[in-house]
Image (tube, helix red, strand yellow):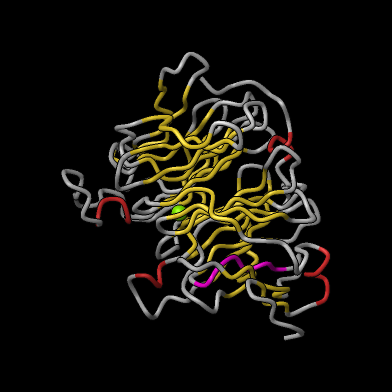
Amino acid sequence: MISTPPHLEIYDDRFKSLVHPMSALETIAEGFTWTEGPVWFGDHKCLLFSDIPSQRILRWSETTGLSTYRSQSGFNNGNTRDREGRLIGCRHGFRDVVRTEANGQLTILADSFEGKRLNSPNDVIVGSDGVIWFTDPTYGIISNFEGYKSPPEQSARGVYRLGPDGVLAAVVTDFAQPNGLCFSPDESILFIAESGSSHDDAVPSVIRRFRVEGATLIDEGVFATIDKGLPDGMRCDVEGNLWSSAADGVHCFAPDGTLLGKILVPQVVSNLCFGGTDGHRMFITATTSVYRIFVDVQGAESWTRSTSKGMA
Ligand code: MG
């Protein structure tokens, strides 16, 4: 370790060009139960995020502060946007992946596979080709969410691919608990978090790397290991560095898997996203709070900086 500023651990000098040691970690919202699913809406200059147990999706902006975007959210967890700018979310309660149309109506995109209900879709991303990829661990149906605890129907805790034609395919089926996922900047690599260690000590807390070959994923093994807690939500920046949630903060890995540094956060981190009106902010959902920090690099998802329309 090269130096230890109050909220950064720097393992490699390259990290200094990504997060300035003087960058402040700000709390922008607090008092929740378990925050997750941050997604930046550049066209509305606002952040949406989930507070899963309270069944809310919250909206935060620099100018108007905090408000409720949706109540009775069905224990909505991970969020992203499709290429038309529409909100795509994962709902534990309804065990589905749902799209919010421009008029505010909800369209269920996937809730079953081979005639059986999904477990509890957790996190989701959309490729530039419109393909939706999501993970389906059992967390949402084994947790004590009143009224929604139920046994899994799927034999696997799968990673799914939903094509624009509506065809749903299980593309990886050997995870203990798949969780967050993100693309490399050119979308040739898909990273998927294995967070199964939360229920089985024998399962390592790793990020797995897959090469995208059309509609299939080629397993390229372990990309990185999380040394504190487990990986949940993740994002890549434009330079291909991967930023992962962990128990002690956000861990930043170079494209070759080298740990460059950590942003230390006072609470267990669940997820993160890039955004901000200047495209240089990282928003971090961590247990009961949401944090923001200035970063010198922008998100790989070009739409986090776009002005595309979509939010109702
Ligand atoms: Mg997650």
Residue 156: x %, y % from top left: 36, 56
Residue 226: x %, y % from top left: 55, 74
Q: Nearer the viewer, residue 209 or 107?
A: 107
- Tell me the quarter of the picture where residue 83 sits: top right
Judged left or right of residue 133, residue 122 is left
For residue 101, above or below residue 79? above
Q: Nearer the viewer, residue 200 or 210?
A: 200
- Tell me the quarter of the picture where residue 304 sits: top right
Residue range of the region highlighted in magenta in the rendering: 248-253
Residue found at x 77% / y 85%: 2
- Tell me the quarter of the picture where residue 307 sits: top right
Q: Quadrant of the N terminus?
A: bottom right
Residue 29 covered by magenta stretch: no
For residue 78, above or below residue 142? above
Residue 108: x %, y % from top left: 39, 27
Which secondary structure dominates the residues rendered in magenta?
Answer: strand
Q: Nearer the viewer, residue 52 or 69?
A: 69
Q: Residue furthest top?
A: 103
Name the quadrant where ligand 1 sits. bottom left
Judged left or right of residue 196, residue 131 is right
